[in-house]
Amino acid sequence: MQHEIGKMTGSGSRYGGAALCAALVVSGCMTAKLEETRSLTTHIAEGEGVVLLAKPQVEGSTAEDDFLDCVSARMARQSGIRMHGNNEFQDALFPWFEPSTAPQRAEGVTQLLERQLVRQRIEKSGVRYIVWVDGLTRQTDSGGSLSCALSPAGGGCIGFGWWEKESDYDALVWDLKQAKTAGTISTNVVGTSALVGVLVPLPFIARVRSAACNRLADQISGFLRGDDPSVEAG
């Protein structure tokens, strides 16, 4: 497997792309791109928590609950960051962080903090950063043909089918202590899977959403720790 990483660093931004292609006899083929913009210095301290919430949408889909659970679990496991359950947080702050009533910008939190009850509940939760996640995984293309047949002498499959999926997610980081937007992070993973018919169908699956989960979780963790964006982990 070849692993190539490209970097572009500048004032408050980072781009990282990785080619993750392997021969179909081993797995599917994936390409990934990461982007980051920063507007505030961040350094999560011990005892401070993070909650991931699905960004409210006027129309269409938002980030899937199980994807948020995947990102949250990896952040807690890999980086030790204290993650707060999204349902628990929304219930404790009901109705102020429901999709229909949540502030549209981090600066709107200032008005909420003027409410003593809201301020007390946020302080009790220990949540310092809210990360709003938006995006989805979808199939973008497919092709090929695979046919299977049975006969008195036996059966088998012949042909080749393939499909492409894309996972595209954006994360907006709010600093509740400063009531400001700290920055944005995005990941895009495209993968091609295949089903090869050689007597029996042989699947070669590109696990696109799993890769997007891992990459977004690692990127958010590094952002919150204040890691140098010019240094890309290998």
Image (cartoon, rainbow, N blue to C red):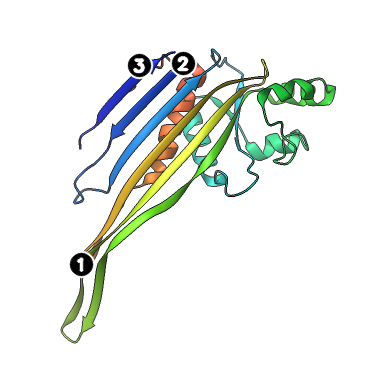
- The image position of residue 148, as x and y in percent, is 25, 75
Q: SS for tag 2?
A: loop
Q: Which residue is mark 1?
A: 159
* Left or right: 219 in relation to 171: left
**Residue type marked 2:** Gly
Q: Which residue is the extreme one toward the right?
A: 116
Residue at 55% x, 39% y: name it.
134
Label 2: few (<14), some (14–19) or many (≥20) C-alpha neighbours in 10 Å? few
Residues marked 2 and 3 touching at CB (< 8 Å): no
Q: Which residue is mark 3?
A: 231
Q: Nearer the viewer, residue 110 or 72?
A: 110
Q: Earlier in the sequence, mark 3 or mark 1?
A: 1
Residue at 39% x, 52% y: name it.
140
How far apart are the alpha carbons under marks 2 and 3? 13 Å
How far apart are the alpha carbons under marks 3 and 1? 44 Å
Residue at 44% x, 38% y: name it.
213
Q: Which residue is mark 2?
A: 12
- The image position of residue 14, as x and y in percent, is 40, 21
Q: Quadrant of residue 181?
A: top right
- The image position of residue 32, as x and y in percent, is 34, 36
Q: SS for tag 1?
A: strand
* Left or right: 36 in relation to 104: left
Q: Earlier in the sequence, mark 2 or mark 1?
A: 2
Residue 112 higher or lower than 161, as above or below: above
Q: How many marks?
A: 3
Check the picture and name the quadrant holding the N terminus: top left
**Residue type marked 3:** Val
Residue at 18% x, 80% y: name it.
154
Q: Which residue is the extreme one toward the bottom?
A: 152
**Residue type marked 1:** Gly
Q: Earlier in the sequence, mark 2 or mark 3?
A: 2
Q: Nearer the viewer, residue 126 or 25?
A: 25
